[in-house]
Structures are given as C-alpha cells and as structure tokens.
Image (tube, rainbow, N blue to C red):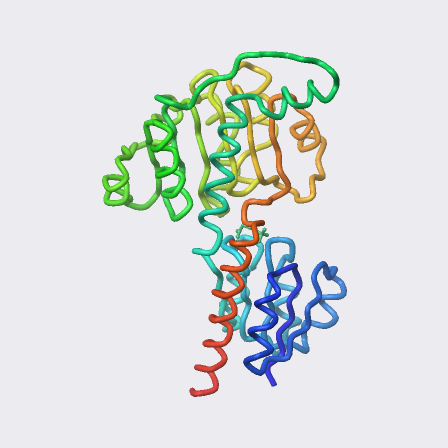
Amino acid sequence: MVKVLITDKVDQSLVEMLKKNGFEVDYRPGIKTDELLKIIGDYDAIVVRSRTKITREIIEAGKRLKLIARAGVGLDNIDLTAAREKGIEVVNAPEGPTESVAELTIGLMIAAARRVVELNMKLRQGEWVKDYGIELFGKNLFIIGFGRIGRRVAELASSLGMNIYVYDVVDVTTYAEKLGAKVVKSLEHGLSIADVVTLHVPLTKDTYHMINFDTIKMFKKGAILINTARGAVVDCEAVLWGLENGILYAYAADVLENEPPKTTCEQRLIQHPRTIITPHIGAQTREAQRRIALIVAEKIINFFKSSAER
Ligand code: 3PG
C-alpha cells in the first residue's frame, strides 16, 4: 500500500480521495521538523503547504520517498535540487488559488488606498477621523510577474479603470495585448510611473529582495506597494524606509520573510499605521483549498498509477 503523509492543513476531500483510491494516509497537520525527520522514512509521498520546509535533510531521510506534492503554488519551501538528485518527483497545483489571491490583492489595494484599516483602528479607539484616501480609477498599476495571478489581477484592475503596465522576465506580450496591458522594458521605468505596484513573482535567488534600498528609490513618490507573492521578495528595512521617507503611501502584504514574523523590522512593519499585513491567507478560502485538494489528489493518484504500470 502506498503511504502518504500530509503535514499541513488541507481540504478533507484530499484525504478522502486518496483513501478511496487505496492509499494509506496519515494526516499530521502542524507536525514539527524533528518529528517529521524521524518518520519521513516510512512514506512514499508527502503533501505540504508553505509551512513545512522540505530541506535536503528531510529528503535524504525520506528513504522511500518518490513524490513531494505541494498543495498550492510556491515551491520555494522545497529543496528542488535535492529532490531532483534523488529522483523524487515534485508536483503542485498552480491553477488552484488564482482567483483567491487575485481577489485579496485587489482587496488590499482598495483597503490601502482608502486607509480602511488605519481609520477603522482609530474608530475602535473612539476617534472619528474623516481623512482623505485616493481613488484607483485612472491610476497606473504596475504588475511585476505576469503569470496566472498577475493576469487575473490585470483583468480585475482594468475593470476598476486602472492603466495596466506589466513586467516579466519572459515574453508576455501576447497576454498583455489580450488584456490591454502595456509591457515595460525595465523594472526601473515601471516603478517610476506606477501609482500602485503589485508583486506576483515566485521567490527565487533572482527575486530575493527585488524591492531593496536601490529599487525603492526608483518608486514614484506616494506609491502603494502590494505584496501577495512572498515576503522575501522585499527587503523589510527598505520598505520601512520607503514608508518613513515619503516614498510609499502604503504597504499592504499577505506575506512576510519569516512566517510567523521573527524580526524587529517585521514587527515594526505590522504595527505601522500605513501598512496592512495579513497572515498568508491568499489561498485560504474554501473554494481555493477545495480546488487545490482535487488537483493534488489527482496528480498523486496518476503518479502512482503510472509508476505501477512502468
Ligand atoms: C501558494 O504558494 O500556494 C500560496 O502562497 C499559499 O500558500 P499556503 O498553501 O501555505 O497557504
């Protein structure tokens, strides 16, 4: 019997589908690394979300491991080189949370522009402050990373009347034309014209701290920065500096470099009046989790079916 270990909270349909197809499933959401290291040797497959870090050490301890399934999109928590060296297959569900993350991105954009959290906090403290916000209509939105989520954000933001500019390391001209977006040739140019910048890139060694002290200085004064990608795509210190030096009007993010937060900078960012930070809830909707569960279950079932046929 194929043994599958699930180490993070997933939609129950994933567990049910696997069991129905003859898999033995151990559901251990929240398991700690040292415990995982002790038991991983018993399993043929592991299912994780971003909380579980699949390091080289874990991969090496996984003597029977044939498949790592990421119930979600980002693979930055998995040592892909170590997996490849061991011949372990890695699958994910990139199409699962597109709608949910795109909707949260637009929600954060509106909340940041209208200072919803800041003014709501004041009201909770008894202060009726009727301060100005800004409209998104007619403003320039710069989307960095034009994959599934970036493109859906473009569609939603166009309907708000925003002008869409995009940047990607691959050629996205066809998608951009279809969505009425303009491709900018350099990050610098995009940052200099944007009223709102939104990040939709994976975390890689090339995107690590992409927003840093150099790039933050390229922003148009008073811009809003949105990050529903990965915390480490921005340098926390540079964002704080941008907020405190009149560059950023607001920073709204669903992600932090350390989750849960660890550094003083992250604490300061969370407490800052002009930030909105949520606890990585982009894919945390019933619909997205259900979609992800079905995609991942199917990939696991097909993988073991075709390995048995080989
Ligand atoms: C993803 O990469 O799928 C999203 O960031 C969601 O991550 P999560 O499954 O850990 O919530």
Residue situated in front as seen by the camera: 228 or 206: 228
Tell me residue 288's x, y (percent).
52, 54
Relative to 288, does residue 69 appear above or below in the rendering?
below
Locate residue 301, reporting x and y percent.
50, 76
Left or right: where does residue 307 sit relative to residue 25?
Answer: left
The picture places residue 280, in percent across and down from the top left corner, at 60, 44
Residue 264 lies in quadrant: top right
Residue 280 sits above or below residue 194 on the image: below
**Quadrant where the image shows the C terminus:** bottom left
Pick whichever, 102 or 255, lies toward us: 102
**Picture coordinates of residue 149 (x, y %)?**
42, 45
Q: Is residue 89 above or below residue 107?
A: below
Q: Is residue 241 left or right of residue 305?
A: right
Residue at 72% over, 58% down: 30
In the displayed structure image, the side of residue 164 where residue 239 appears, left or right: right
Pick whichever, 13 or 1, lies toward us.
13
Q: Quadrant of the N terminus?
A: bottom right
Foreground of the two, 302 or 156: 156
Q: Quadrant of residue 235?
A: top right
What is the count of numbered marks?
Answer: 0
